[in-house]
Image (cartoon, rainbow, N blue to C red):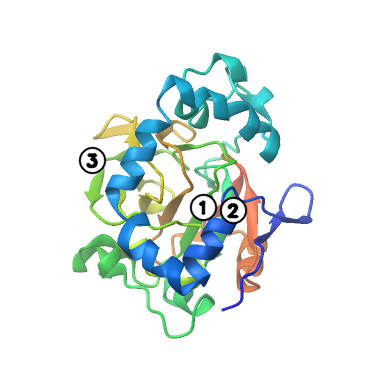
């Protein structure tokens, strides 16, 4: 497969852009070079490397990386609660909180919103997901959940991927009002979740460390909400109260340094995803959305 730059659509402006990827040359080596693949299997996907780098990003010395990172990736740091020189470490900057009003939330009851800032791929039927990537690859819900019962529950349902790049705000939120239970952790590897990596190996979602929570909602049924770990992600941190009612927009958790992904799975017939997201996905184009932005609506009792 030929190496291609990551092209995406900025939904707010309708402009097509090329993503700035930190370490893109390294990713190209890992996923498009036979020697890189050896390094990937022997070292990069292993937990100890991500944990080691995560700890390094917690040190006071790591503050030196903050300003160059902001400048090179043109991060709008004015949205953050703290100024760049107030952060105690790179990770403190990376999972920064935003000022009140930095994001606009669609609070209509029948509206599903994005749980995070990121690039979105949306599928009306999860059974068609694998066909959009490498021919011959399969995607198994049973492997994703590590449960046959859960796989049967979400068979034929809709599926949303929100990919968080290192440039993005790395806290994730609840997309609707719901009752939430405990977070289930599934151990796995630490492959990159970059588009470069997914194009080469769809099974990354099935093999990486991940956690999922079931959101029992009035309008959208039972939503399976996954957080996927990745290369250099030191950890997935849940900040919500288990076994409680939550409101749309409340924080669910955050990722340490690295690119990461949130997945939302819906039971069949519960949600209508926005047409523009579905159409761009069919063309192989990710759409940049922001947390709180509408991505779909309830099929039952919806007003759209």
Neighbourhood count class around disc 3 (C-alpha, 10 Å): few under 14, some 14–19, many 20 upward: some
Res 43 seen here? yes
The residue that disc 1 covers is 162
Residue 209 in percent (x, y) is at 30, 53
Is there CB contact under 8 Å for labels 2 and 1?
yes
User: Where the N terminus falls, by quadrant?
Assistant: bottom right
Residue 280 found in image quarter: bottom right
Residue extending farthest front: 35
Residue 41 found in image quarter: bottom left
Of badges 3 and 1, the one in the foreground is 1
Q: So how many labels did they put on this image? A: 3
The residue that disc 2 covers is 119
Look at the numbered disc 1 and give the secondary structure of its residue.
Answer: strand
Residue at position x 45%, y 29% in the image: 91
Residue at position x 39%, y 32% in the image: 56
Look at the numbered disc 3 and give the secondary structure of its residue.
Answer: loop
Q: CA distance from mark 3 to mark 1?
A: 21 Å
Residue at position x 39%, y 58% in the image: 191
The residue that disc 3 covers is 182
Residue 14 in percent (x, y) is at 78, 54
Residue extending farthest top: 86
Q: CA distance from mark 2 to mark 3?
A: 27 Å
Q: Which one is nearer the viewer's eye here, 100 or 143?
A: 143
């Amino acid at each position: 497969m030929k190496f291609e730059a990551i092209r995406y659509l900025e939904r707010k402006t309708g402009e097509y852009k090329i993503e700035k990827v930190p370490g893109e040359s390294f990713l190209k080596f890992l996923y498009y070079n036979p020697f890189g693949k050896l390094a990937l299997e022997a070292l990069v996907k292993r937990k100890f490397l991500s944990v080691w780098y995560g700890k390094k990003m917690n040190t006071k010395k790591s503050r030196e990386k903050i300003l160059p990172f902001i400048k090179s990736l043109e991060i709008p740091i004015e949205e953050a609660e703290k100024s760049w020189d107030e952060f105690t470490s790179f990770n403190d900057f990376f999972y920064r909180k935003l000022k009140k009003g930095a994001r606009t939330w669609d609070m209509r009851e029948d509206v599903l919103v994005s749980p995070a800032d990121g690039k979105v791929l949306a599928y009306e039927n999860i059974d068609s997901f694998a066909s959009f990537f490498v021919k011959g690859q399969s995607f198994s819900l049973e492997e994703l959940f590590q449960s046959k019962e859960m796989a049967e529950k979400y068979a034929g349902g809709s599926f949303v991927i929100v990919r968080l790049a290192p440039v993005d705000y790395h806290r994730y939120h609840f997309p609707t009002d719901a009752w939430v239970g405990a977070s289930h952790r599934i151990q796995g590897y630490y492959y990159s979740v970059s588009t470069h990596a997914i194009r080469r190996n769809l099974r990354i979602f099935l093999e990486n460390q991940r956690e999922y929570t079931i959101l029992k909602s009035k309008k959208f049924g039972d939503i399976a909400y996954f957080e996927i770990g990745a290369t250099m992600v030191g950890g997935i941190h849940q900040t919500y109260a288990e076994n409680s009612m939550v409101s749309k927009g409340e924080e669910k958790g955050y990722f340490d340094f690295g690119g990461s992904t949130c997945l939302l799975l819906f039971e069949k017939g519960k949600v209508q995803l926005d047409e523009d997201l579905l159409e761009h996905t069919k063309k192989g184009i990710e759409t940049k959305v922001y947390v709180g932005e509408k991505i779909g609506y309830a099929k039952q009792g919806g007003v759209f």
